[in-house]
Amino acid sequence: MEVAAPFSRKDKIIQQATLLFDDKGYSAASMRDLAKEVGIEAGSLYSHFKSKESILQNICFKMATEYVDSIRPILDLPFNSSEKLTLAIQSHIRVLTQDPQASSVFQQDWKNLSQPYLNEFIKMREEYEEAFRQIIAEGIKNGEFGIEDEKFVLLTILSSINWTSRWYKPDGKLKPDQIAKRLSDILIKGISTSNK
């Protein structure tokens, strides 16, 4: 049996920072606030992270990597566009619900990244959005999706699934797979030509 790695002080700082940034917003949260949450002196934080932004970088890039890695394999599957889009929505919900607070920070606070990290993050976000756009464009081309404005559909889908981080509760009635299925059913039914 594989033994989980011990939870380090650095991990605890990231976890508490995620909760703090999600609750107060990155700009309003201070290193002093974070030190209080972790239970250490503010100066001790700097032995683990050089700045508040370096913690934000850690959160944002970890989440960006998880989202991008989750969708890449879907593009090459021998499935139709509806099936690929279903899998893309479901993989997004799985990543999001594993850590809804980190997903929320990722979605809301990435604009606080400085260069060159901001450009690097934007490239990853664009790669992720492009994967969704490719699936949608493919579905329009092959006649599965009866819409013309792929950008509008892309933004609608991403807005709908990203909003899940604001209301999802791990102890709620709906489990991640149920949420993913309901969202994919509703969103794909709305653009599918088979429902016209």
Image: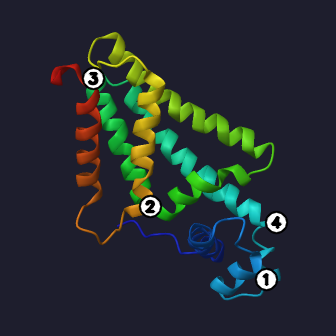
Measure how far apart labels 1 and 4 are at the Cα level.
12 Å
Instruction: Please tell me which residue is depicted at 17% across the width and 21% down the height of the picture.
Output: 194
Q: Mark 2 or mark 4, which is nearer to you?
A: 2
Measure how far apart labels 1 and 3 are at the Cα level.
52 Å
Q: Mark 1 Cα within 10 Å, few/some/many (few <14, many 20+)?
A: some
Residue at numbered disc 3: 79
Q: Secondary structure at mark 2?
A: helix
Residue at numbered disc 2: 166
Q: 119 or 148: which is nearer to us?
A: 148
Q: Mark 1 or mark 2, which is nearer to you?
A: 2
Residue at numbered disc 1: 42
Q: Mark 3 Cα within 10 Å, few/some/many (few <14, many 20+)?
A: few
Q: Secondary structure at mark 4?
A: loop
Q: Which quadrant of the rendered structure holds the N terminus?
A: bottom left
Instruction: Please tell me which residue is depicted at 32% across the width and 29% down the height of the picture.
Output: 84
Q: Secondary structure at mark 3?
A: loop
Marks 2 and 3 close (CB-CB < 8 Å): no
Q: Mark 2 or mark 3, which is nearer to you?
A: 2
Q: Please state which amino acid type lies under the numbered disc 4.
A: Lys
Q: Please state which amino acid type lies under the numbered disc 1.
A: Ala
| Residue 179 placement, left or right of 136 | left
Q: Position of residue 62 (x, y in %)?
A: 58, 53
Measure how far apart labels 3 and 4 are at the Cα level.
46 Å
Circle nearer the N terminus (3, 4): 4
Q: Position of residue 63 (x, y in %)?
A: 55, 52
Outermost residue toward the left in this view? 195
Q: 9 or 34: which is nearer to us?
A: 34
Number of numbered callouts drawn: 4
Mark number for residue 50? Answer: 4
Circle nearer the N terminus (1, 3): 1
